[in-house]
Amino acid sequence: MVARAQVTFQALALAALVAACAGSSNTLTVAGTVEIREVRLSPFASGRLQRLLKDEGDSVRAGDTVAVLEQPGLAELIEQRRALAEAASTRTAEIRAAEADSQRSANELARTRALAVQGIASPQDLERLQSAAAAAAAKLQSVRASVGESRAARAAAQATEAIRDQLVLVAPADGIILTRFAERGEVIAAGVPVVSIGVVRAPWIRAFVGERFIARVRTGQTVRIRVDGYPDTGFAGTISEIASRAEFTPRAALTERERADLVFGIKVATDGAGGRLKAGMPVRVEIPLEP
C-alpha cells in the first residue's frame, strides 16, 4: 500500500516536472530595464546663455521654449539690415522717374541727330543732348545698383534673423528635463548641448536573450511585460530590434559552457502603458519562443 502510494507520488511529481519543462520551452522569461529616448538640445549658432526656462525634473511639452541664447550686437545688426532693406520699396518711384528721364533723353538725342544730318540742329545742341542722355543713363544705373544693394540687405536681414531664431531652443517633444549641462551666462558653442530631454511617452525595454534561445526569437514578435508594482497586469510590447553581436563573453567562445554565457541584446517597444512604465524600472519580459 505504501509502495503503491510512493509510486503514485513519483508519477505525479514526474508529470509536474514534464509540464514545467514544456512551459519553459515555449516561453522565455528574461529580465529587462525600462529606458527612454534622450534628446539633447543644442544651438546651431554660438552665443551666451541668457535665459534657462526649465530645470532638471521639469516637464516640457513640444514647442515649449527651454533656453534662449544671445549674441552681442545681433539685435542692432538686424535693425540696420532691416532699414537698408526697407529702402528698396521707397526707391521704386525714383527708379521709374530715372527710367522715364533716361528714355526721354535718348529720344531727344535721336531726333537731334536726325536734324543735325539735315543741317537743322546745331552741333552745340547735339553735344548738350548727348551729355544729358549720358547723365540720365548714369543716374538710372546708380539707382538700380542701390536697389540691388537694398535687396541684398533684405536677404542679409533674413539670414541674421535666422541666426537669432537658432539661438532659441525649443522642446521637440513632450518629456522631462533630465540633465542641465550649462548655467546662465555661459558661452555655448554651436552644437554643444544645453539640456537633455527624456521622451517619456515612448519608453522601451532593454533585455538580453541567451545564445541558445536567440534563434527562436524574431523582430516584430509580441511579448508580455511584467512589473513588480502591477503583479496582476501584463503590458504588451513588440521586439523591435535584436543585436547582431553577442556580449559578456570573449568573442571567440570555444567551449560549450562559454557559449551558454553568450547573450544578445534586444529592444522591446511599448506604448508606455499609460505612463506606468518609468525609466530605470526593472521588468520581466515573457517571450513566446518560436519552434
Image (spheres, rainbow, N blue to C red):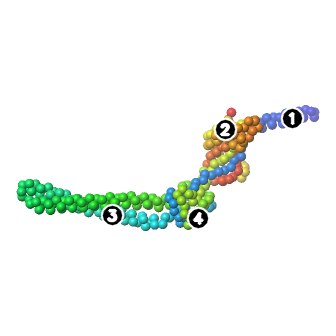
Q: Position of residue 85 (x, y in %)?
A: 36, 62
**Pointer 1 residue:** 10
Picture residue at 40% right of the left edge, 66% below the top: 79
**Pointer 2 residue:** 217
Which numbered disc, 2 or 3, marks the residue closer to the eye? 3
- How many residues crowd around disc 2 within 10 Å: few (fewer than 14), some, or many (20 or more)? some
SS at circle 1: helix
Q: Position of residue 73 (x, y in %)?
A: 46, 66
Badge 1 amino acid: Gln
* Mark 2 in CB contact with mark 4 (< 8 angstroms): no
Which numbered disc, 3 or 1, marks the residue closer to the eye? 3
SS at circle 2: loop
**Marked residue nearer the N-terminal end (3 or 4):** 3
**Marked residue nearer the N-terminal end (1 or 2):** 1
**Position of residue 193 in the picture relative to residue 136 (left or right):** right
Picture residue at 66% right of the left edge, 38% below the top: 217
**Pointer 4 residue:** 183
Q: Where is residue 288 in the image (x, y as percent from the top left)?
A: 68, 39
Q: Report which quarter residue 221 is drawn in.
A: top right
Q: Report which quarter residue 289 is drawn in.
A: top right
Badge 3 amino acid: Ala
**Marked residue nearer the N-terminal end (4 or 1):** 1
Picture residue at 17% right of the left edge, 57% below the top: 106
Picture residue at 90% right of the left edge, 35% below the top: 6
Q: Considering only vertical position in the picture, is 276 above or below 94?
A: above
**Marked residue nearer the N-terminal end (3 or 1):** 1
